[in-house]
Amino acid sequence: MTTTFNNEQFLAAQKASIETLFGLTAKAFEGVEKLVELNLQVAKTSLAEVAESTQAALSVKDAQELMSLQAGLLQPAAEKAAAYSRHLYDIVAGTGAEVTKAAEATMADNQKKVLALVDTAVKNAPAGSESAVALVKSAVAAANNAYESVNKAAKQATEAAEANFTAMTNTAVKAAGSAAKGKKSA
């Protein structure tokens, strides 16, 4: 009966692992699909803008008008690049969050299983093995605490990186705007 129970546990664990794998694969494909969609949209928009800019450049009558046209294109290009970067970051961060969520759920489930296994072992432990049982419980608790600390640090690092990315993008757009204004006034 113990062998049957262990086989059933093994099969259930394998089934859960396969379901998790397919779920993560689906999330990864959703992320790739969003990236492809974003890049197709950018390619279509860029092609139309290049055609429009080319027509405008062909209708320029003097160098001053050409400089003005170039200056007028600089700020929107920087804003579009920043918007693309933000959208790309959102897609990657969203996909990463989904994977992290699934990993956390799997870890929580595994932690429950390990604790149940430890409890079962404690109940069936021979007399005099209290110190070994305490050591195992301590090791499990330490591993859980370490996982939670690493997870918390990773979340904080992600938040800091996101804040830095936003600040950097805003600075780049402002710099491009200043450069465009400088060219127009020159």
Image: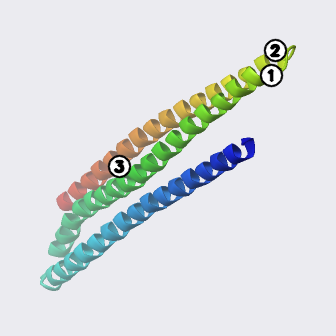
Residue 133 x/y as whole percent: 78, 20
Q: Nearer the viewer, residue 184 or 97?
A: 97
Whichever of labels 2 and 1 marks the residue nearer the N terminus, that label is 1
Q: Residue 49 carries which label?
A: none
Task: Name the quadrant of the C terminus.
Answer: bottom left
Quarter residue 47 falls in: bottom left
Q: Nearer the viewer, residue 76 or 36?
A: 36
Q: What residue type is labelled 1?
A: Ala
Residue 12 x/y as whole percent: 59, 49
Whichever of labels 1 and 3 marks the residue nearer the N terminus, that label is 1
- The residue that appears at 37% across and 67% down in the rendered structure is 33
Whichever of labels 2 and 3 marks the residue nearer the N terminus, that label is 2
What SS does tag 2 mark? helix
Residue depth check, mark 2 versus mark 3: number of the one nearer the observer? 2
Residue 182 horizontal side relative to residue 26, left or right: left
Q: Which colour scheme is used?
A: rainbow
Does the CB distance between marks 2 and 1 fall below 8 Å? yes
Q: Which amino acid does label 3 sit on?
A: Thr
- Separation (CA) of disc 2 from disc 3: 58 Å
Residue depth check, mark 1 versus mark 3: number of the one nearer the observer? 1
